[in-house]
């Protein structure tokens, strides 16, 4: 059962984000044991965002996709973690997974840089799709630091309290015994290195894939090849990173 299967239209008393949170709770996800969900922080975040909706803001992604990263990749299934910032702020572009793009236009520049690292040396990258759902279904937690944004306002919800969920999710993955590899791209993602037990888990860190990154220290870093090598060295099957 998916998040969209569970989601129902909010009542007059319940905003769309609170309704999405209720549907996620009904799913019985293993992530629901995080303090974020058990101790009221999730409800407080939903209340803030629903207040913005009531004030006329267009919140993205669709409510049924807000918790999609956690729905597609339950805690026991995580083999790799990729952290992003927040959803694309253009309606129709985001589907609840970090860096994943389902819009009708050309792929975002950062995503093209990411996908270029999948191409074998000397071969042309495949930019036919930017939907990273297959990764999530294979154990790659694609989690943003904020699960919502407002149309045309990148970063609008970064201070709404979502960061607690990100920190707790990273710490929960780190607390497990199963070897997991964390792909940390850019300063914001790398700031969470302290939450990771490096005696059990791997970290592959680099600069952000954005073309605005002047250091240009993501291209050529081959994060996917290195992640699979690390997983195999630690007794886990490699990830199939193909999208098509």
Image (cartoon, rainbow, N blue to C red):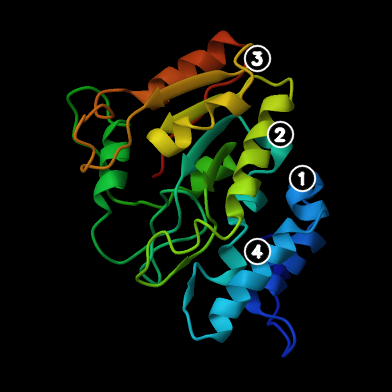
State the residue position of label 4.
45
Considering only order in the chain, which callout, 2 or 4, is on the residue closer to the N terminus?
4
Q: Which residue is mark 1?
A: 34
Mark 3 vs mark 1, CA separation in Å: 21 Å
User: Which of the pair 77/158 is nearer the observer?
Assistant: 158
Cα distance, mark 1 to mark 2? 8 Å
Counting from the top left corner in percent of width and height, residue 38 is at 82, 53
Residue under the image location 63 percent in, 11 percent down? 199
Q: Are marks 2 and 3 in contact (CB under 8 Å)?
A: no
Q: Residues within 10 Å of mark 1 (few under 14, many from 20)?
A: some
CB-based contact (under 8 Å), mark 4 and mark 2: no
Q: Which residue occupies the foreground of this view, 74 or 192? A: 192
Quarter of the image where one finds residue 87: bottom left
| Distance from Cα at disc 1 to Cα at disc 4 | 15 Å
Is 134 left, or right, of 12 in this rendering? left
Q: Residue at x 59, y 15 (%)?
A: 198
Q: Viewed as shown, does residue 54 lie left or right of 209?
A: right
Asked whether the residues under the numbered discs 1 and 2 touch, taking CB atoms below 8 Å apart as contact, a structural biologist would say: yes
Q: Are marks 1 and 4 in contact (CB under 8 Å)?
A: no
Find disc 3 in the rendering and name its residue: 200
Label 3 Cα crowd, 10 Å radius (few <14 / some 14-19 / many 20+): some
Nearer the observer, 143 or 193: 193
Q: Could you tell me how far apart the alpha carbons at marks 3 and 4 are, in whole angstroms? A: 32 Å
Q: According to the image, label 2 marks what residue?
A: 172
Q: In this orientation, does residue 118 appear? A: yes
Give whichever of discs 3 and 1 has the lower sequence position.
1
Q: Earlier in the sequence, mark 3 or mark 4?
A: 4
The span from disc 2 to disc 3 (Cα, nearest Å) is 13 Å
């Amino acid at each position: 059962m998916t998040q969209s299967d569970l989601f129902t239209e909010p009542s007059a008393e319940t905003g769309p984000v609170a309704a999405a949170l209720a549907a996620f709770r009904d799913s019985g996800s293993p992530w629901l044991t995080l303090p974020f969900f058990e101790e009221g922080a999730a409800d407080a975040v939903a209340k803030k965002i629903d207040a913005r909706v009531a004030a006329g803001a267009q919140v993205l992604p669709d409510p049924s996709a807000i918790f999609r990263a956690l729905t597609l990749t339950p805690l026991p299934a995580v083999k790799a973690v990729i952290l992003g910032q927040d959803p694309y702020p253009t309606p129709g572009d985001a589907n609840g997974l970090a860096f994943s793009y389902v819009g009708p236009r050309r792929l975002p520049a950062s995503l093209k840089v990411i996908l270029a690292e999948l191409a074998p040396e000397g071969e042309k990258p495949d930019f036919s799709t930017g939907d990273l759902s297959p990764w999530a279904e294979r154990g790659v937690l694609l989690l943003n630091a904020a699960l919502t944004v407002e149309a045309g306002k990148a970063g609008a919800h970064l201070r709404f309290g979502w960061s607690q969920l990100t920190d707790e999710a990273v710490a929960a993955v780190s607390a497990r015994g199963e070897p997991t590899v964390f792909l940390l791209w850019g300063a914001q993602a790398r700031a969470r290195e302290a939450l990771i037990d490096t005696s059990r888990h791997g970290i592959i860190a680099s600069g952000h894939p954005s073309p605005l990154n002047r250091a240009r220290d993501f291209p050529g870093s081959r994060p996917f090849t290195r992640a699979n090598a690390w997983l195999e060295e630690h007794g886990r099957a490699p990830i199939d990173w193909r999208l098509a």
